[in-house]
Image (tube, rainbow, N blue to C red):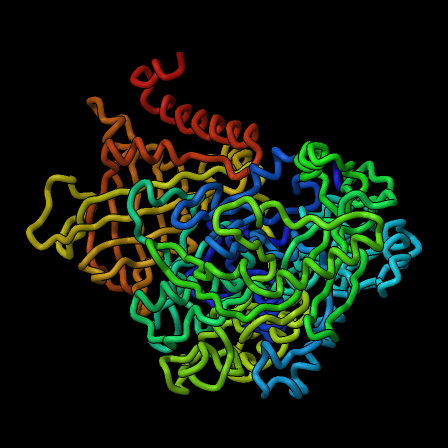
Amino acid sequence: MVSPPSVVRERVSRPPAELEGDYDAVVVGSGYGGSVIAARLAEAGLRVAVLERGAERPPGAFPETATALVRQSSGNVGAWRVGAADALFRFHFERGLGALTGSGLGGTSLINAGVMLRPHRPERALPRALLDDEALEAGYDAALAMLQPVSLDPARHRRSSVLARAGLGFRPVPLTVASEGGLSAAGVPMAPCHGCGNCITGCNRGAKGSLDTNYLSHAARHGAALFTGVTVGAVRRSGAGWLVEVDVPAFQRRRFEATPLHVRARVVVLAGGSLGSTEVLWRSRAAGLPVSSRLGQRFSGNGTFLGFTVGTADVMHALGEASMRSSGRVGPTLLGMFDLRDRDAAMLLQDTAIPRALVPLLRPLLGALGHRVEHLVAWSVTAGDEGLGRLTLRRDGLRIDWPDAGRAGVLQKVSGELQTLSRHLGGSHRDNPAWRWLPGAPLLTTHPLGGCAMGHSGASAVVDTAHRVFAGNDAATHEGLYVCDGSVFEGALGTNPAWTIAAMAERCARHIIDATPRPRRERALPPATATATGDGVRFTERMTGWLSPTAARAPQPHARPDDASDLSFLLTVEWPSVDALVATPDVTARSLGTVRCALLDPAPLSVAAGAFQLFVETPEGLTMRHRFEAVARDGTRFRLEGFKAIVDDPGPDLFHDTRTLFIEVHRGEVLVGRGVVQTHLGDLTRQVSTIRGTSSRTSADLAARARFLATFLGSVRDVYGGLVLPLFR
């Protein structure tokens, strides 16, 4: 059980049901690339949507036990996938090399140590054109002002003092951790660090400067809409803009069919990290988008390794503590480093505390080896690598192909340095046991880089030096399609990449703003106001029937004219507050989904910002109402209005009334047709199974479902009387 956080923050994300159909810019991902881009484009007056797979996680929502850690983890082991789509920790295991990435509003910044360093040899990972670029230097300065890293006083923590006595030049590193309370650069309240040592499993105190506290909050206050729980499949060209193919796993649309949702934008920025952006481009290529044949190449783990020193002469105070009962002795996860980047075998050795959630797993392991866990310190090593990995799409999943990564010669050099360091501390070195024991000796990188390497043409790279995606193997690029994250590096950066990614994103944002005409608006965009989602409720429904240009109003379902076309829609309906629904059953819910009808367009049409009212009182009785706009891929818009008449006519018509929707479709002021759709029994069963509360807490979810069903059945009972009384016994 995690204690309440020291600070309470307003939510900045919006529920996916509030997605609109069109934006000036869509940013896919919210890490160090995407958050910067979103903030700067929103500042410039563009309507920006950020699509993030994971959830918004405020202080108090991060795991501090092994059980909670497992619940918030997912894994890809080859073609097998386990765990939730929005899990905080995402493990990708392959023979030779695996990767750990973070999923949530703020990306990996939620679970990293917050180290801000510049590369020692940037020419190994960046094109020559960027090395002396004034815009990149300005980007470093701008990122520094927003991220506000600080170097902690080594005297405050015993581990720093012990490591300094090793005599090898240990020094503190700049960290995005608040040593004192106050406000972030975006005005978000920050608690002072309590020194619990749990930075890499998420800060429950509210002291860590993850991206939700700075760039993303800044973006939201300038009107950007931040959506969580949204996955992106592919991007497609659509006229002068782009269609972004999205899914919302929580909507459970795949229980009915696999038709994706679409969002339109003039500009799309892929910023899902090395694995995420490369996968989206692979899927886009499979859907017909021409890209460079170099896609997926030059993948690097940045030479990151994990090692241990055990049996030290001193207690190291490197075990994470409960965030709200911390003694302060541990400090942040990472305090400093031994900088060996000026050697032939260049590397950084950074001390790392073991987060509290992992301590119970290490105690028996070290005990079996005759060591006490209190005399242990872990090392995060960054040594660079050859960047010989490849990212490929196989069996509908991204795969890392680098079976020999664990046999790289640099490993022996790293082990040698750690052995020397361990002797200075009175202990001995141990390699990461996972590397030794698992098949294929896999390394696990926390800095996956490359896959969409930057260069001067598609013959050697995937994006140009302005981050634009090449449209093949020459110098032509796709207008309005960018990649901006760690995937654009040509190889290993040799240091923690966060600051450099943010600096490059500042530079990229300037290119996008200069290349994108700003929309003319009579007034500035209002700040995005997040909608509370704690007690909402949703369901997904599919209805099928027909649409005819000659049908009369409210036709009988079986009186289908000869000129009718099949019509179906798959919509998710969501009320942000079940309290409001119970109090006023005609309160409007949002709807989002797709429509299929050849009379309108051969391809599925997208529905966004639709409106649904469960029960509206009319002189004839209760009515359910749907109103929404369906947009074709070429931008053509149709207005659909539908109603279900809940009236107790003679005969047993309850089932007919609640599952039959009469439809009218207009294009502008012109009537396109009328028709009728129904929910068939199999789809009704699926629909009931999709009723969910919007809260992540099981008790709140169940309560929201129960109250929704009680409201629905209660209103139906009032109309149909004895026909539904058995449901209440």
Query: Is 244 in front, or is 162?
Result: 162
> What residue do we see at 48% from left, 26% from top?
706
> What residue do we see at 24% from left, 31% from top?
681
> What residue do we see at 34% from left, 24% from top?
719
| Name of the residue lying farthest toward the left | 562
Q: Position of residue 299 (x, y in %)?
A: 50, 67
Q: Position of residue 267 (x, y in %)?
A: 46, 73
Q: Position of residue 355 (x, y in %)?
A: 71, 43
For the question of whether residue 458 can be seen, the reply is: yes
Image position of 81 (left or right of 636): right
Q: Position of residue 36 (x, y in %)?
A: 62, 68
Image position of 668 (left or right of 276): left
| Name of the residue lying farthest toward the top | 729
For the question of whether residue 636 can be seen, the reply is: no
Q: Quadrant of residue 284?
A: bottom left
Number of numbered discs overlaid on the protein picture: 0
Query: Is 601 in front, or is 119?
Result: 119
Q: Quadrant of residue 533?
A: top right
| The N terminus, quarter of image | top right
